[in-house]
Amino acid sequence: MIILGIETSCDETAAALIKAKKGDKKVQLLSNIVASSLPIHAQTGGIIPENAAREQVKYIIPVIEKTIQILKRPENEIDAIAVTIGPGLIGSLLVGVETAKVFSYIWKKPLIPVNHLFGHMYANFIKSENNNDIEFPALALIVSGGHTDLVLIKKHGSIKWLGGTRDDAAGEAFDKIGRLLKLPYPGGPYVEKYAEGIKNDVYNFPRPIIDSDDFDFSFSGLKTAVLREVEKIDKEKLSNETIKNISYSLQKAIFDVLIKKTMKAAVRFGVKSIILGGGVAANQSLKKSFELEIENSKLKIPFFVPEKKLCTDNGAMIATAAFFNHKETDWIKIQANPELYFD
Ligand code: KG4
Ligand code: ZN
């Protein structure tokens, strides 16, 4: 079957086509189009929801049009439509949800509502260079701009939420601290670039709740720790070298906590694979640190990270989540839900 996935939860307008048949362990990506309104948000140093929604309206039809143009008769070849219903910004979500309803109604195709967070986990179930199967139970670490969660996937359709952030998400911490360092928005990819090549953890920032006996995270305190350091420095003298050292120490502090809690959960629940998802998973240093940690531990389990372009928001992950958790729903009952979380 072929599924059209539509994702508009935040600042990306995205659509994709995936193909798979019953029993497949991974899906094939046929086309994947993402239009980002990021340059507009970079100008305002963050996302103004109304601006994001207006851009969604502008891009949604051209993006879907471009996605399906590889098919001769899309209305015949597409078997179902999947759409993100939350969490996210209400104005942005509504654009995708209402557009998906119209296509479903006109083409007479089933409509499948998808939780964006499931999408990030399921980006790992798209065929890539790593063609190993993901064995269950699997442990998922979702690290995005809005979320940091550890989730146990017992099998498709059966998950258990283990813990999440009590305040800022990992990506949010990068973005807020990036602003303190006067880096462009979003800070995450810039922090990664600045940290490259640095080997010493000069600042040794706190690792919040790293040893707590739960699977929660807390990153808001880090912002204060970095602010204290930045305040000591004359703003004019925030040199390249200082930004590089702060970026490295910040990344190290956040990644140490993410890795330690994930490894603890992996042991506690005896998982057979670890998967990563969300924008922060695009960070190559996080990927390498995880690989090294797993290699040096007694846990010799496979580790999966989606291809870089599939870590950040896209329609392919939404179509894939729909394929493995097929919940066809009457379009009249489908509503955007900005507060959606794990059931
Ligand atoms: O998953 P995503 O595209 O959107 C949400 O669902 O939130 O994630 C965006 C987040 C931003 O906070 C951004 O700074 C972060 O992912 N990010 C990164 C990197 N690329 C994106 N963080 C660290 N290193 C990166 N290379
Ligand atoms: Zn996301």
Image (cartoon, rainbow, N blue to C red):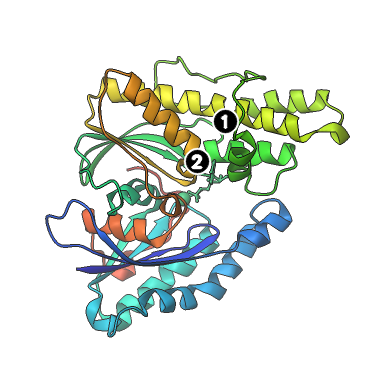
Residue that lies at the very extreme toward the left in this rendered image:
23
Is the distance from the Cβ of mark 1 to the nearest ligand 1 atom less than 8 Å? yes
Q: Secondary structure at mark 2?
A: loop
205, 219: nearer the viewer? 205
Element type at mark 1: helix
* Front residue of this view, candidates 270 and 297: 297
Residue 108, relative to residue 171: is it above or below? below
Task: Name above or below for residue 25 compared with residue 275.
Answer: below
What residue lies at 37% left-to-right and 66% top-to-bottom?
A: 16
**Quarter holding the N terminus?**
bottom left
- Where in the figure is residue 307, as x and y percent of width and height? 39, 50
Tag 2 and tag 1, C-beta contact below 8 Å: yes
The quadrant of the image that shows the C terminus is: top left
Rendered location of residue 315, percent (x, y): 39, 62
> Of residues 124 and 160, which is closer to you in this image?
124
Q: Residues within 10 Å of mark 2 (few under 14, many from 20)?
A: some
- Tell me how far mark 2 sits from mark 1, CA to CA: 10 Å
- Whether residue 310 appears in this view of the structure is yes
Instruction: Say which residue appears at 15% left-offset and 62% top-offset.
Output: 21
Q: Residue at x 43, y 71 (%)?
A: 98
Figure check: 341 above or below 322: above
Splitting the image into 4 quarters, where does residue 180 fall?
Answer: top right
308 or 35, nearer to the observer: 308
Q: Earlier in the sequence, mark 2 or mark 1?
A: 1
With 270 as the anchor, is 236 left or right in this view?
right
Q: Which residue is mark 1?
A: 251
Name the amino acid, label 2: Asn
The residue that mark 2 highlights is 283
Q: Quadrant of residue 267?
A: top left
Disc 1 marks a residue whose amino acid type is Gln
* Cβ at disc 2 under 8 Å from ligand 1: yes
